[in-house]
Amino acid sequence: MSGTALDTKTLIKAYERMLFLRVAQQELVKLYMEKKIFSMVHFYIGQEAVAVGVCDALQLSDKVLGNHRSHGHYLAKGGSFRRLVCELLGRSNGSAHGKGGSMHMIDKSVNFIGSTPLLGSVAPIAAGVAFEQKYNGRNAITAAFYGDGASEEGVVYETYNLAALYKLPLLLVIENNRFSINSKLKDRRSARYNLKTIVEGFGLRYERADGNDYHDVHSKAQALVQEIRAKKEPAVLECMTYRHMAHSTPLTEESYRDEDTLEHRLKNDSLKRISNQLIEHGISEKKLSAIEDSTRASILKDIGFALTSPFPVKRALYTDMYV
């Protein structure tokens, strides 16, 4: 970036994308509370800077995979909110024709290869996708998102080893929101646990970013992506962030939180940070409010479409099957 005008333009674009993720999730919370979504839902509120910061560093041809908390990853990669909300409501217009729900989204049109709720399983699957890219000489990379709890699974360490061994074009993004459901890091890891040492010991690049700061995430993701694309070697980007809600469902239980209290989370909220930066760049609060109103109107229009969309017909039970 160079010059104030370009900086402001970039800031607004990032703000709009992050705001879309935030408002979309807020409206989905309402649908859940109204009992229109029957499956378990893991909301992404608070972690928007990670998905947008990383995906803004990717190209359309790059592939993304997610986990149980992947609404933000899907939307940040360019996915359709209309198709997402249809999927959550089990409608035939959903990204997986209403068969996948919140945790099994897929949209190959934007190279969102899929999301899997099995803890840590996205890492080896993403390694397989990256292997195909390298084997067939594609100038593209794969990015996978998973949490700090999943990062402790054995299959993830195996993936580090194979990714480094085969020099895969793979970016593994750890969204460290400090809790595995409600288990704190200090209760799960030795005091000497050092992820940087582990990752680099396997032969991958490691970077750590402030997951509540779009600029920090984006700049570090962009540098890693450029290096991965040039050298076809894997890297891990750990983003320290906060989820504002409980592990699943729209609860705001605070009893197990100490470091990331409500006051602390709101003070360090990624959207608040970027909106303050825009105000410093001369963008008025009235302008920001107008952007939010327009964003919410668009989202409500898509929700209205989804609520009147048809459910899958019975014969759809026998389609999209291997046997």
Image (cartoon, rainbow, N blue to C red):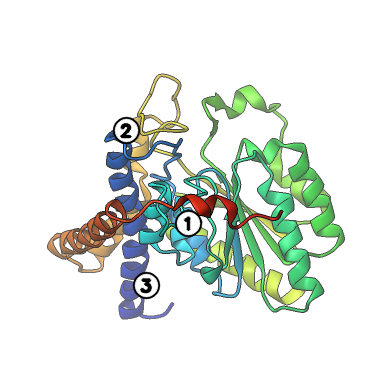
Q: Nearer the viewer, residue 292 or 309?
A: 309
Residue beneath label 1, please? 97
Q: Which amino acid does label 2 sit on?
A: Glu
Q: Which residue is drawn at 78% across and 65% down?
A: 131
Direction from residue 212 to residue 114 in the image, left or right: right
Q: Which of 236 and 101 is in front in this view?
A: 101
Location of residue 142 in the rendering, given as x and y in whole percent from the top left corner: 66, 64
Pick the quarter of the image with the N terminus. bottom left
Describe the element under mark 3 as helix, strand or loop.
Answer: helix
Sequence-first disc among 2 and 1 = 1
Q: In which quarter of the image is residue 221?
A: bottom right
Location of residue 251 in the rendering, given as x and y in whole percent from the top left corner: 36, 29
Q: What residue type is labelled 1?
A: His
Residue beneath label 3, please? 10
Residue beneath label 2, please? 263
Separation of marks 2 and 1 at Cα, in angstroms = 40 Å
Mark 2: few, some, or many residues within 10 Å (few <14, many ≥20)?
few
Direction from residue 42 to residue 141 in the image, left or right: right
Location of residue 283 in the rendering, given as x and y in whole percent from the top left corner: 20, 67
Q: Residue at x 85, y 63 (%)?
A: 166
Q: Quadrant of residue 29?
A: top left
Location of residue 170 in the rendering, given as x and y in whole percent from the top left corner: 70, 62
Describe the element under mark 1 as helix, strand or loop.
Answer: loop
Q: In this view, does 163 lie above or below 194?
A: below
Separation of marks 2 and 3 at Cα, in angstroms = 28 Å
Sequence-first disc among 2 and 3 = 3
